Image (tube, rainbow, N blue to C red):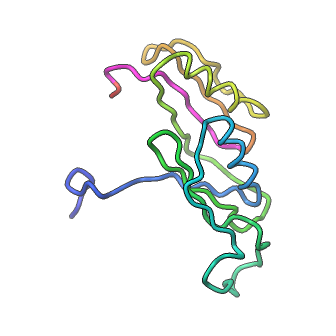
Amino acid sequence: MSTTKNNPTTKLNAYLFFDGRCEEAIEFYRRALGAEVIMLMRFKDSPEPPNPDCPPVPGDKIMHARLQIGNNAVLVSDGRCTGKPNFQGFSLALSVKTEAEADRLFAPLAEGGQVQMPLTKTFFSPRFGMVIDRFGVMWMVLVETASQK
């Protein structure tokens, strides 16, 4: 049995389905987090024909994109474009080096979103907060301490 400790090629990436709002989400994360689009493919550019067992998706919608946020990749798609994105049971955590950087990233994520816990000092971080962004994705922003590295 292989483990990630013994298999350094194993990667774990979040894959978010925005159900028709992916392009808007990409632009938002570019502005808010400095995300870089590494790869983007629209449904109309797929080398495979559409699956007849799935509802049709507009060709200009995003089939797959890869965003680079810092040293991490986040994969995104419009999915089936049902208009009902559902992000529950997880959170994306942004670990930063300074309180100023935490403030800089938290503020735009909160625009049009819902702050769950304002940035504040906690027993585990000098600055920690939680926010659900305008797309329904929960983010935790924290200043990483030496013991968390």
* Residue 126 or residue 60, whichever sits in front: 60
Q: Is residue 60 magenta?
A: no
Q: Is residue 143 magenta?
A: yes
For residue 10, above or below residue 43? above
| Percent x, y of residue 119 | 60, 18
For residue 122, above or below residue 133? above
| Percent x, y of residue 133 | 70, 37
Residue at 75% of width from left, 34% of height from top?
A: 113
Residue at 47% of width from left, 53% of height from top?
A: 13
Residue at 79% of width from left, 72% of height from top?
A: 58
Residue 3, quarter of picture: bottom left
Quarter of the image for the C terminus: give it: top left
For residue 121, above or below residue 44? above
| Percent x, y of residue 41 | 63, 67
For residue 41, above or below residue 125? below
* Residue 66 or residue 131, whichever sits in front: 66
| Percent x, y of residue 11 | 37, 55
Residue 38, quarter of picture: bottom right
Quarter of the image for the N terminus: give it: bottom left
Residue stretch in magenta: 136-147
